[in-house]
Image (cartoon, coloured by chain):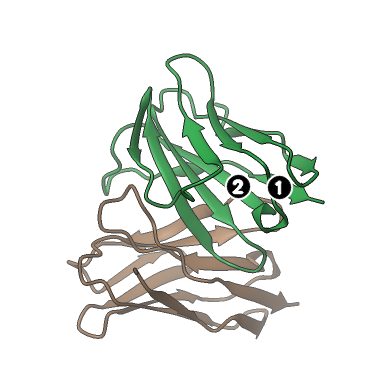
Chain colours: A brown, B green
Amino acid sequence: QQQVKQSPQSLIVQKGGISIINCAYENTAFDYFPWYQQFPGKGPALLIAIRPDVSEKKEGRFTISFNKSAKQFSLHIMDSQPGDSATYFCAPSYNFNKFYFGSGTKLNVKP
Amino acid sequence: NAGVMQNPRHLVRRRGQEARLRCSPMKGHSHVYWYRQLPEEGLKFMVYLQKENIIDESGMPKERFSAEFPKEGPSILRIQQVVRGDSAAYFCASSPTTVTSGNTIYFGEGSWLTVV
């Protein structure tokens, strides 16, 4: 069983604050670590992803930090905005064609 | 450029009926994936198909569920004799070829199945 544990389940952040979501995995064969964003009634959309040969990747307000030895990776959202309110999923993969989704983190950014 | 198209978006079936969910991949995409999302949970992989071939069906329930991606037309996920536990959102995704770090899979907006 490919186990992926995501935390927290829900998160409330004030506008302008930093949102941090964590993902722990067991399978050391994983070699692709994406975060997906999902709005209600919509499909998930790729937000940002990282390969294990780097420890951090930044795209705009979104940063992935990767700790290979701890088998963890996290998503940081800087200057959080109400429009970021959504559910976020980590979904590591080891062959790109099958993604193992975490249980999701519901983020609410208060104005 | 149209994205991954799924229909119907919402489907209500009585227990014992059949449900057929359709997915048209993005233009130029030849790989299709089906995922299921139960309420308040993450997506679970069901099956990966190329045209006329099932590549990986390790996530498909052994009974009542089948999938196809014919040479012409959309991919179909078929659920026979539906039960209440089949109520979920079913997402289709597509990719141009085998996914690498240079591309990704693209999800449709899902088909919400309710079994009453």
Q: Residue at x 27, y 49 (%)?
A: B101
Secondary structure type for disc 2: strand
Q: Residue at x 71, y 52 (%)?
A: A41
The residue under label 1 is B112
Secondary structure type for disc 1: strand
Residue type at mark 2: give it: Tyr
Q: Quadrant of residue A64?
A: bottom left
* Residues packed near mark 2 inside 10 Å, few (<14), some (14 to 19) or many (20 plus): many
Q: Tell me residue B32's x, y (percent).
A: 43, 35
Residue type at mark 1: give it: Trp
Q: Tell me residue A10's x, y (percent).
A: 63, 81
Residue B90: numbered disc? 2
Q: Quadrant of residue A51?
A: bottom left
Q: Quadrant of the N terminus of chain A?
A: bottom left
Q: Are marks 1 and 2 in contact (CB under 8 Å)?
A: yes
Discs 1 and 2 carry the same chain letter? yes
Q: Is residue A66 above or below residue B81?
A: below
Q: Tell me residue B27's x, y (percent).
A: 47, 23
Q: Is residue B66 above or below residue A110?
A: above
Q: Give whichever of B11, A53 is nearer the camera.
A: B11
Task: Give the CA distance from mark 1 to mark 2.
Answer: 6 Å
Q: Quadrant of the C terminus of chain A?
A: bottom right
Q: Residue at x 65, y 51 (%)?
A: B89
Q: Earlier in the sequence, mark 1 or mark 2?
A: 2
